[in-house]
């Protein structure tokens, strides 16, 4: 028997072999794969010549495979099964039965705002799912989203444009936060009070904070910064027991105000609000698990649910 190569086979021959092994008659096999009887006979004859083996022979119980025919038929059936599985599209995602870890880019502000509601929903809908929050890298956050190592980015990003989709969650704004009885603001917020009060600044507040700093600089609103910290989380207790002022996102400030005695006021300068969004790479646009996770964010946090749209023309 000479060696046969995969390149010598045609999909019609493979389908016929599979059907013939299952039905035991050439007529039924031909009908099953949509061939005429003569075409099926021709295809089987060609296979016999190429393999130098009868493959199937007539018996009292129908067409039965030779040992080589049986081995080839089993191999063909397995290969066609894999091919059919690949062509069926994405398998569904069942949250209740899922056992996997999702990785999400989220700032410290985002963790405070999103995690309580998100964890409560995961507990009820997907108890086997684990969430791993990844710190937003200072450069090239797109790389791990492209590779799939990180599933989503949630927050304010200016660098996730080409090849990314996005869904708007809500509009956020900055507010000034001081202790409840701060004497400098007995009469409310004024530009003079803002300039005179020492301030604290969180360095890790991300891209939106860069926009804030540029806007204050443009409007010539100086700040007397006396404290720099890497994250916002330490600031509530510091502010509540000092004369420091801090500028922070409104939703975060409202959460802190439930824990300690703080006063929230508007900024003395015009700083436009910014949009918090969820971002995903186009590679995972149709992935059921990714679709479910980003749907979780929009259902929980979107002010107005909007479909994902290309962040820019691809």
Image (spheres, rainbow, N blue to C red):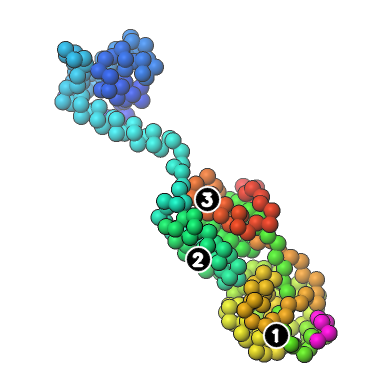
Q: Disc 1 and disc 2: Cα gap in Å?
A: 31 Å
Identify the residue under disc 3.
Answer: 292
Percent of width and height locating residue 56 = 21, 18
Identify the residue under disc 2.
Answer: 133
Q: Which residues are magenta?
A: 186-190
Q: Quadrant of residue 52?
A: top left
Earlier residue among tags 1 and 2 = 2
193 sits left or right of 105 in the view? right
Closer-to-camera residue (104/9) = 104
Q: Is residue 162 visible?
A: no
180 sits left or right of 71 in the view? right
Identify the residue under disc 1.
Answer: 179
Earlier residue among tags 3 and 2 = 2
The main secondary structure of the magenta stretch is loop
Q: Disc 1 and disc 3: Cα gap in Å?
A: 41 Å
Task: State yes or no: discs 1 and 2 in contact (Cβ < 8 Å).
Answer: no
Residue positioned 81% across, 86% down in the render: 186
Q: Is residue 116 above or below residue 245?
A: above
Element assignment for label 2: strand
Task: Let me know if residue 183 is in the magenta part.
Answer: no
Q: Is residue 29 visible?
A: yes
Residue positioned 58% across, 81% down in the render: 234
Closer-to-camera residue (217/50) = 217
Q: Disc 3 and disc 2: Cα gap in Å?
A: 17 Å
Q: Quadrant of residue 63?
A: top left
Residue positioned 48% across, 60% down in the render: 123
Sort mark 3 into few (<14), some (14-19) or many (20+) by Cα contacts within 10 Å.
some
Q: Is residue 130 above or below residue 218?
A: above
Q: In the rendered view of the protein, which quadrant contains the N terminus?
A: top left
């Amino acid at each position: 028997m000479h060696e046969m190569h995969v390149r010598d086979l045609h999909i019609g021959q493979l389908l016929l072999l599979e059907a013939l092994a299952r039905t035991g008659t050439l007529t039924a096999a031909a009908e099953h794969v949509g061939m005429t009887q003569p075409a099926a006979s021709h295809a089987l004859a060609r296979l016999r010549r190429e393999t130098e083996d009868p493959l199937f022979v007539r018996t009292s119980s129908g067409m039965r495979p030779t040992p080589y025919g049986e081995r080839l038929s089993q191999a063909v059936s397995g290969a066609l099964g894999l091919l059919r599985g690949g062509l069926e599209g994405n398998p569904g995602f069942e949250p209740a039965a899922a056992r996997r870890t999702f990785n999400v880019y989220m700032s410290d502000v985002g963790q405070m705002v999103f995690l309580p509601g998100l964890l409560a929903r995961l507990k009820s809908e997907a108890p086997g799912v684990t969430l791993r929050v990844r710190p937003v890298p200072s450069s090239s956050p797109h790389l791990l989203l492209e590779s799939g190592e990180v599933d989503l980015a949630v927050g304010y990003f200016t660098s996730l444009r080409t090849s990314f989709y996005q869904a708007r969650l809500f509009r956020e704004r900055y507010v000034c936060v001081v202790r409840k009885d701060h004497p400098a603001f007995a009469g409310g917020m004024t530009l003079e009070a803002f300039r005179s009060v020492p301030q604290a600044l969180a360095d890790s507040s991300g891209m939106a904070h860069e926009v804030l700093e540029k806007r204050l600089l443009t409007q010539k609103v100086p700040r007397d910064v006396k404290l720099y910290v890497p994250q916002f989380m330490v600031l509530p207790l510091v502010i509540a027991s000092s004369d420091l002022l801090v500028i922070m996102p409104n939703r975060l400030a409202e959460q802190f105000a439930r824990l300690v005695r703080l006063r929230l006021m508007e900024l003395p300068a015009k700083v436009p609000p910014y949009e918090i969004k969820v971002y995903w790479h186009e590679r995972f646009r149709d992935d059921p698990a990714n679709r479910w996770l980003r749907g979780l964010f929009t259902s929980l946090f979107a002010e107005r649910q909007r479909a994902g749209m290309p962040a820019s023309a691809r």
